[in-house]
Image (spheres, grey):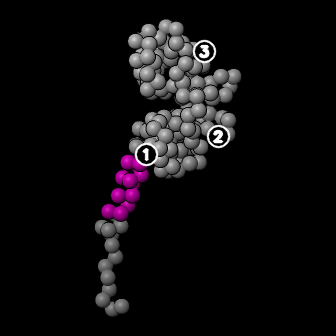
Amino acid sequence: MLVQEILKLKGNVLYTTHSGASLSEAVAALTEHDAGSLVVMDAGEMTGLITFREVLQAVGKTKGDLSAMTVSDFKVAQPVVARPDMPIEAVRELLVNHHQRYVPVMDGKVLMGVVSFMDVAKAVLEEQGFENRMLKNFIKNWPEENGND
């Protein structure tokens, strides 16, 4: 399965913010959309990613006072990105090796979407389930051997 297939299943909804937004606004957007990440877009280009992990780091650092903090203070400035034509196994490896739960999907400089570790896990389970069903069907319909060979 390729990343572009996961994006088709997820739909075209993208949640974004900008570097100058307050961290409180980002938290409100994450909460409102029940999202785990926001892509940071400035002047039409991706400049980072903010997730609940960065928000929790900000809460810890500021003792909960996010009023003066901006997205740029805590965003991941250069998150690892995936391409739409990447196999899902490669994305899983990227997420694990770079300790990210979310990966923006970029086609050149165009943001196509975000894939989460949960999206990857679902895709892997679905793919394994399909293979399992196919193998069981193959075994169930195994041709009988003819003793005349």
Label disc, if present, on residue 15 of the rendered structure: none
Sequence order check: which comes first, mark 2 or mark 3?
A: 3
Picture coordinates of residue 86, whole percent (x, y): 56, 48
For the record, the magenta segment spans 123-136
Say which of 120 and 134 sits in front.
120
Residue at image coords 47%, 36%: 100
Residue at image coords 40%, 18%: 60
Mark 2 neighbour class, 10 Å CA radius: few under 14, some 14 to 19, many 20 or more: some
Picture coordinates of residue 13, whole percent (x, y): 54, 29
Left or right of 144, for residue 68: right
Say which of 129 and 138 sits in front.
129
**Magenta stretch: dominant SS?**
helix
Q: Quick check: can you spot residue 101?
A: yes
* Numbered disc 1: secondary structure: helix
Q: Alpha-carbon distance for marks 1 and 2?
A: 21 Å
Residue at image coords 43%, 26%: 53
Q: Alpha-carbon distance for marks 2 and 3?
A: 25 Å
Left or right of 126, for residue 80: right
Label disc, if present, on residue 107 of the rendered structure: 2
- Residue type pointed to by label 3: Gly
Q: Quick check: can you spot residue 32?
A: no
- Residue type pointed to by label 1: Ala
Label disc, if present, on residue 123 of the rendered structure: 1
- Residue type pointed to by label 2: Asp
In the image, which is nearer the foreground, mark 3 or mark 1? 3
Residue assigned mark 3: 20
Quadrant assignment for the C terminus: bottom left
